[in-house]
Structure formats: C-alpha cells, structure tokens
Amino acid sequence: MNNKDEAVISVKGLTKKFGDFTAVNNISFDVEHGRIFAFLGPNGAGKTTTIKMLTTLLSPTKGRIRVNSYDPMHEKDEVRRSFGIVFQDPSLDDELTAYENMEFHAILYHVPKNIIKQRITHLLNFVGLWERRKDQVKTFSGGMKRRLEVARGLVHHPKILFLDEPTLGLDPQTRNSVWEYLKKLNKEEEMTIFFTTHYMEEAERVADMIVVIDHGKIIKTGTSKELKKETKTSSLEDAFLKLTGRKIRDENATSLDRMRLRSRVWRR
C-alpha cells in the first residue's frame, strides 16, 4: 500500500468479551496509510484490548480486522512482520543487555545480518543508550527501559508502529525527541503510527486523526480541530473531558485484562 487514502488498518464491528464483561463493543474505524492516528480514552475504555486484537495477541469475540491487508487471526506471521509495537506493560528481558534485547528482536524479525549492527547502533544512539549497551536491562531506570522499548520497536523498519502509552515515564525532553524522530520516520518512510496516550497535548500536536473510545464504544472521530470545534472547547484536553466526563475511572478492568494476558504474548 502506498496511497494515503488506502486503509492500512480496517476494523469493522469489532467486539471483545471477557465472560459477561464487554471490553470492546462493536467498533469500526479505518486508519489510512501513512497517518499518525491517536486512539484516546480513559482508563479501562478498551484501548489496550483493541491493540491486542490488532496485533494478534487476542482473538475477537466477533468482527473483522485487516492489518496491512492481512487477517490477524488467520495470517498471524504476515501481520507480525508488518508492524512494530511498544507495549504499555514492560516486555524487555531484564537478564539480557540492551544490545542483546535489540539483537534478539532483529533476528526474530529477520533483519538482514549485514545491517543488524548498523540499525542497533543508530537506534541506541538515538535514544541515548549506546554507552549502556552492554549493561543488563535490570539495572536500567523506568525511563531508560521505555526508551529501549521504543528503539526495539523500530529495529525492523515496520510499516505500522503501534505505541501503547509510548512516552509514559519519559521526561519532556526525551518525549519531544522521540516524537520528532517518529514524525520524521512517518514523513520520510510513510510509516503509519497508531498510538494511545494520556498526554492530550501530545495527541493534539502530532495526530492527523483522533478516535475517542469510552466504555468500549467509539464516541467521536475527527481531527483535533474538529473535536474542539464540535465540543466548543479551546484544547483537546477540554474536548476529551467534555466527551468522556470528569469522573476518575477505575482501573480494575484494565488490570484484569493485563492479568489474563500476561502469559499470552505471541501465543498462537
């Protein structure tokens, strides 16, 4: 796909239930090739569950998904080769070094041997971890681990990059640096970026299109400008609060989802 009017991600009637609890409720949306797409919602809204269905980690209860024209349920390998992902929860191997984590990922995704070192060197320098490349990840701070996860997600030049709270725990300087690099990749390589965040100013600054989800249902779709105009607010954060309310959300649903899925990564 090379046309920005084509959907690189297509979701139709997607639903996911855990027993009697409906985490995602009959949602539909398209993400055009080469866009930066923000998927926003309060805690427990269904964001992470949706990403896990898009990336083959969860099977839908019903609905249709296409990622880079492939079906995540029946063409798992093809889908996985086309995307990179930075999970909300830590997914690094703490007993390996930063370089070994990157190298393992590169081999897993069949990065050509003659460019693995070049890619790892470039990305570890970008996230400021080259000097710590030989250190075990268990010695890293939370922010350092997050930077390493971002670098690892890019090592195989994915067509689509899924980012679930990618800048959580990063200082403003590092957040800005990461997004400048991602925007450059998006522009130069037409990499599609699908991300969630609770930093509304981040979404307002970088997203081409925004979907707001709450209680498992999509409640609004549009650009930041359109959402602000429709809600008669001056910032995306105010628009978001007007759409989803100001009540503090219980994270129990999200925690339950994490607990159930902790051991399912890449399980067929």
Image (cartoon, rainbow, N blue to C red):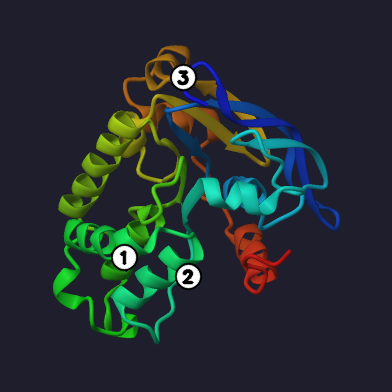
In the image, 196 versus 101, the foreground residue is: 101
* Disc number lying in front (3 or 1): 3
Separation (CA) of disc 3 from disc 1: 30 Å
Residue with the mark numbered 2: 91
Q: Amino acid at mark 1?
A: Leu
Q: Is there CB contact under 8 Å for labels 3 and 1?
A: no
Lower sequence index among marks 1 and 2: 2
Looking at the picture, how far across and down is residue 253, in whole percent?
Answer: 66, 58
Looking at the picture, how far across and down is residue 148, in whole percent?
Answer: 31, 65
Task: Using a 10 Å C-alpha cutoff, classify the residue at mark 2 as few (fewer than 14 neighbours), some (14 to 19) or many (20 or more).
Answer: few
Q: Amino acid at mark 2?
A: Ser
Instruction: Determine which of the numbered discs, if any, sits on residue 188 in the image.
Output: none
Q: Secondary structure at mark 2?
A: loop
Q: Secondary structure at mark 3?
A: loop
Outermost residue toward the front?
114
Q: Which residue is painted at 33% across and 53% down in the image?
A: 167
In the image, 146 versus 161, the foreground residue is: 161
Q: Which residue is painted at 37% across and 28% down in the image?
A: 236
- In this picture, residue 32 sits left or right of residue 176: right
Looking at the picture, how far across and down is residue 197, in whole percent?
Answer: 42, 45
Task: Using a 10 Å C-alpha cutoff, classify the residue at mark 3 as few (fewer than 14 neighbours), some (14 to 19) or many (20 or more).
Answer: some
Q: Amino acid at mark 3?
A: Lys
Image label count:
3
The answer to whether 241 is drawn above or below residue 230 in the figure is below
The answer to whether 141 is drawn above or below residue 11 in the figure is below
The answer to whether 133 is drawn above or below residue 154 in the figure is below
Residue with the mark numbered 3: 4
* Disc number lying in front (3 or 2): 3
Task: Using a 10 Å C-alpha cutoff, classify the residue at mark 1 as few (fewer than 14 neighbours), some (14 to 19) or many (20 or more).
Answer: many
